[in-house]
Image (cartoon, coloured by chain):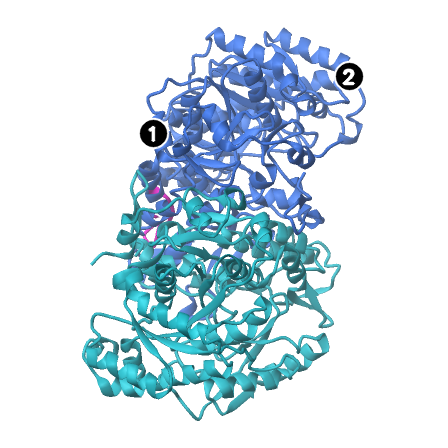
Chain colours: A cyan, B blue
Amino acid sequence: MKSDLQISQETDLEPIIEVASKLDLKEDDLELYGKYKAKINFSGINRSKDNAEGHLILVTSINPTPAGEGKSTITVGLGDALNKINKKSVIALREPSLGPVMGIKGGAAGGGYAQVLPMEDINLHFTGDMHAITTANNALSALLDNHIHQGNELNIDARRVIWKRVVDLNDRELRKVIVGLGGPIQGVPREDGFDITVASEIMAILCLAADLEDLKARLARIVVGYTFDRQPVTAGDLKAEGALALLLKDAIKPNLVQTIYGTPAFVHGGPFANIAHGCNSILATKTALRLADYVVTEAGFGADLGGEKFLDIKVPNLKKAPDAVVIVATIRALKMHGGMKKDELKNENLDALKIGFANLKRHIRNMEQYQLPVIVAINEFVTDTDSELTLLEHLCEDQGILAKRASVWANGAEGGVDLAEAVVRLIDRKEADYKPLYLLEETIQEKTETIVKKIYGGNGVVFSKKAQKQIEEFMKNGWDNLPICMAKTQYSFSDDPSLLGAPEDFTITIREIIPKVGAGFLVALTGDVMTMPGLPKKPAALNMDVTNDGEVFGLF
Amino acid sequence: MKSDLQISQETDLEPIIEVASKLDLKEDDLELYGKYKAKINFSGINRSKDNAEGHLILVTSINPTPAGEGKSTITVGLGDALNKINKKSVIALREPSLGPVMGIKGGAAGGGYAQVLPMEDINLHFTGDMHAITTANNALSALLDNHIHQGNELNIDARRVIWKRVVDLNDRELRKVIVGLGGPIQGVPREDGFDITVASEIMAILCLAADLEDLKARLARIVVGYTFDRQPVTAGDLKAEGALALLLKDAIKPNLVQTIYGTPAFVHGGPFANIAHGCNSILATKTALRLADYVVTEAGFGADLGGEKFLDIKVPNLKKAPDAVVIVATIRALKMHGGMKKDELKNENLDALKIGFANLKRHIRNMEQYQLPVIVAINEFVTDTDSELTLLEHLCEDQGILAKRASVWANGAEGGVDLAEAVVRLIDRKEADYKPLYLLEETIQEKTETIVKKIYGGNGVVFSKKAQKQIEEFMKNGWDNLPICMAKTQYSFSDDPSLLGAPEDFTITIREIIPKVGAGFLVALTGDVMTMPGLPKKPAALNMDVTNDGEVFGLF
């Protein structure tokens, strides 16, 4: 069986200028990064501003399990299949983070014959967006600590700085650190910590900004900490937003690449789906919508986490709701939700599948609450039996939902044609009538409770003493009308990662709320949320190599 | 008076493909980064391998002062002037570091009408080389700390880790830190610190590597720390070199840009000139030599520091010595060396100039020790009087050295024609007969003493107890045959920055020696050497801005 990297390396890529021409983009609309990558420049973005918008397809999934669900793979394969049936389509994906690539994953750009290419570049430095975000994030830290060191005119309480530094690596050693040691000329000692770059608020801001002006305004609103009298201090107070926007002026431009089948793909932005909203950039999605008839995009983690945030945070910023929602499921993952262990999954087990279906069912009902048409994509694995596949189709049918098998990993575009045709028919019925889950003017407590009850299926929310105090404070600061960005485990509807399937009778505890005023949401932390992953005992990096001619090994 | 940024923005750039064609490079030899930047790919580098090499011109200077000496400006202007007199020329410069750009400088790519362009890009993320080096450096840190955390098979003593993390920013707060706090699942607590990226050994390695194979071999030789029984541990022991080389596979390719006059310029690599050797990359300089008849390149700081290292560290790796050495001096800076204060420099003062000439004179004699022909470039300022300029010319003449005025900052290529013609004549005399200052087989003490006595004009060297112990240890490890990379203040021949001119009767104390076995040199630290600058009270960043259309402000 060929690895993703081998398949990628065997593919003859089209020059990106030709890929762009499929979207009526001219060479002058592009900033080339080699032959096969480009950014769309501002003139390219602006030229399309009056175009009618195409149809938006949101790909989301059941709660992820170690068995894998293949959401990106389906997203890519569906885009390829739509083009195969002569629908002008574009894929809009997130950029992978180098941390997980060097750690466990080795790569993340779809899989098999449903990949975005060149996968080596996309998985390594790509067009430098992550680095620009890292630099902007850390420049703000340097300016902040320098301000405190050089006299602290703003009266910032160094113990109440909430802005952390970032690296785009998995580096547990940096989770909790003390900085500024060494005496008075080396800065002000304080506790600090590093997050992974994709957890930076600047990543979320870049992905939600409408343009450079909006980016700058959002950057200025970032809350970096508090004064000794507990007033919020912003990046704007530090006069940092101009320099930060300057550092991000190219990173904000959408990246264009292609799939194995030459389908145009915007791969741009990649905020965490727990501490942030987990979708690719507004600017990429918007530009894609103006250039194509169908745009296939994905949300992070499962529909309870990434899907909910796509619909309640991204959609209002995008000013466009999905015309259809595709929920990706696999027989294997549903069987895990039904109680099977990972190493038994190759065995047929209809009972486990039936039990595990409860997870998918709840996600279906959830998406329907937004008044959006739903379809299930069964991402096929070789170990799936026909009885299992048929059973899952029937279970969905019983819910009034169409389920379509897709074998895009093994068969590429051809393997997604059934799904693509069904999605087009679904959109043609024009049933989408987006309705938000909650209203922004509701209280922080109400909005959080709505998510927990209506999406997670929980009984209610417990706010810690700290969170209650924060809510009062946030009301005074005028932040209470922001949407809620839940930071919860992706593995369960509940805040306990071991509760698979469709758990009931649980409450969710909100430990702390983090204001992301620049991004424009409040992060509600449930339990411990990891914002800096660690490396495993044998990191993927140890198998990576490159020859003298630049041939790459160890990405997969 | 126009700012550098304004001049840059008013210039009509040639497409980089056309600039490349002047060097007989084809489009297939390039990896484009937009229209005006490109990397030369491996096929481009290899295609030129059998070409005869052109002439190499090293631009160095007197000891820098706050008055400014304009070495990069002369380097650029000389390259432009050589092309103007129909000599096929290329400029090979270092890349600026974002830290100083955001801190004090606001930009560093020549000045006035002697600039490399597009200056905004070169001064910000450029082609991502700095970010790739930052990432590779910090990936090694993460792999190292993960190894210790995950069982420490190599028996690494966490107290004796010498590999530091880096950021490409001025951030004093990170100079001394404690990492790994928070309990047993958050890593192993230890003291650590961050350097600025240009101080990373990986930057030095990238600049000295002949190709990707050599890069990987050097990366494997990096010493990251010591075991509990004091044996060195390398990046190769951690099996990290493949991943690091992979992260650097594009960064190692030379960057091609252009000057205001369309002269091709390789701007690639930028190691610190104190903790490292301070020259642009071997691969860029080598490729430039194979593609042009004249290559103008610069060394960091003054001729005592950057010049010496160019000749004793870079030249043996480059396997090519300069055909001529240009020493840049200004009337202003020499008057400071002669005792004048900065705010008096606009006044004519022939006596101060005469006294300050001692600094230039020693640098001239030093460069002649390498048996290389020397010429002085007087970088003109509007405040220079004709008497001062004439006096300096006569003082040089008395030393048997030609001095030529250059006004490239104000007048561009035209302002460098006299200098260019003189340099060509000097090279045509073929007097260069490079002789190294010392032999590698000499002891560490002998090599260091040779530099101090023959270049600095000092009486001798004092090795601290720690340094003496290190020398013994390094001999056991077989590192004593490496060249010495002096880390000394750039402001004085001595290790006291306040001793301007040509101080005598001093000794140099070597406090500590840092093995940079991957780069292939031993850094001898004299006094405190700053490897992480801080920001000033009003950082340049606070004046930076970008409009919604991407227009840039605040770089200068």
Position above or below: A499 against B3: below
Q: Is residue B298 visible?
A: no
Q: Residue B46 — which label?
A: 1
The picture places residue B320, in percent across and down from the top left corner, at 40, 21
Badges 2 and 1: C-beta atoms under 8 Å apart? no
Magenta range: B221-235
Position above or below: B64 against A388: above
Membership of A538 in magenta stretch? no
Give B440 or A65, whichever is nearer the viewer: A65
Check disc 2 and report the residue beneath it.
Answer: B385
Q: Is residue A238 left or right of residue B213?
A: right
Q: Please tell me whether mark 2 sits on a helix, a strand or a loop.
A: loop
The picture places residue B127, in percent across and down from the top left corner, at 49, 42
Chain letter for mark 1: B
Q: Residue A326 — which label?
A: none
Give A510 or A108, whichever is nearer the viewer: A108
Q: Is residue A87 left or right of residue B119?
A: left
Q: Is residue A454 visible?
A: yes
- Under mark 1, the amino acid is Asn
